[in-house]
Image (tube, rainbow, N blue to C red):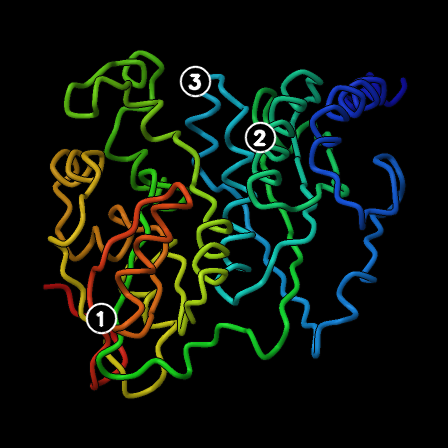
Amino acid sequence: MDYKKAGVDIEAGYKAVELMKEHIAGTMRDEVLTDIGGFSGAFSMEAFKNMEQPVLVSGTDGVGTKLKVAFVMDKHDTVGIDCVAMCVNDIACSGGEPLFFLDYIACGKNEPEKIAAIVSGVANGCKQAGAALIGGETAEMPGFYPEGEYDLAGFAVGVVDKRKMITGKKIEDGDVLVGIASSGIHSNGFSLVRKVFDMKEESLNKTFESLGGKTLGETILAPTIIYVNALRTVRKGGITIKGCSHITGGGFYENIPRMLPDGIHARINTESYEIPPIFKMLAKDGDIAKDAMYNTYNMGIGMVLAVSPADADRAVSLIDQSGQKGYIIGEAVNGDKGVTLE
């Protein structure tokens, strides 16, 4: 008896590391002081000495049961983008610039090519965010995870000067709420998605005109948008972002109030932007009420910013210039903290 016969293939682990190195190399920043394969990742803070009060901000998250769709479709090169996005978008909400990222993959059997495909997505997401992929862990856990399945989670660290942090404390009556379009479902609510739609390969590979000629599988597997560059573009354009909310699990009702100060209420015009057809299909096929949809999904808006009225149109323009799509979707008004959909 040896470790391999017990279900853990050390050689496969070595091969996976070699295969992923080329993807990781493309994410490196000058501040990275270590190579992949060491016991830890080191990142120099020398470049941030000139900040008045440098503050580290962090985020951690996973992809959730969206991975089940990847398993059925045998497509593993985009879920890593989701993993990065869920972490760095939260960091960006505070005004932070992502610095580095670490991933954790746990699997029933280490298949080096599949692991490398997963990490290629993580590296892609890191490139989009400007973060270095400085380390990670692949744990082969036979008997805990079924063969062919895995879990994926990550952890990101960013930095922001304290005086430039986005806190939401100065949002006031009359401020404008600007939304940035999502790519679809992103990475939340997939337990419900999997109850509504048939998760067999044949069904996921079916094409729908209502989905723009795409298959159901590729539509719901579309990776989460990384909003770091869009927010960076708005800030560099001289606009003060008073508040920022990443629309994840809990949808509009839970996430928008997280950026509001006491005494401020958000009004959202749900007809002010385009709702992706996948949400209409999900609501119809699942007989899901409107409030439940907005309490679970992003409904086409992945990020909400609060800005002064004088900055609203320019904020939308700058978002569009960054490659994303911006909309004026509502306003902040005096009232109890919460959200009203109109």
> What residue is disc 1 on?
339
Nearer the observer: mark 3 or 1; the answer is 1
Quadrant placement of the C terminus: bottom left
Percent from the top left, x then y, of residue 148? 58, 20
Task: Specify few, some or many for label 3: CA neighbours under 10 Å numbering under 14, 14-19, or 20 or more.
Answer: some
Whether residue 209 sits left or right of residue 229 in the image: it is left
State the residue at coordinates (43%, 19%): 72
Quadrant placement of the N terminus: top right
Q: Earlier in the sequence, mark 1 or mark 2?
A: 2
State the residue in front, 125 or 114: 125
Q: Secondary structure at mark 1?
A: strand
State the residue at coordinates (41%, 67%): 239
Whether residue 95 sits left or right of residue 301 in the image: it is right
Q: Is residue 106 above or below residue 51?
A: above
Q: Secondary structure at mark 2?
A: helix
Q: Secondary structure at mark 3?
A: helix
Question: What type is the residue that disc 2 sits on?
Answer: Gly
Question: What type is the residue that disc 3 sits on?
Answer: Met
Question: How far separated are the C-alphas under marks 1 and 2?
Answer: 35 Å
Question: How far separated are the C-alphas under marks 3 and 2?
Answer: 16 Å
State the residue at coordinates (55%, 52%): 88
> What residue is disc 3 on?
73
> What residue is disc 2 on?
121
Question: What type is the residue that disc 1 sits on?
Answer: Val
Q: Is residue 44 above or below residue 122?
A: below
Nearer the observer: mark 3 or 2; the answer is 2
State the residue in front, 232 or 246: 232
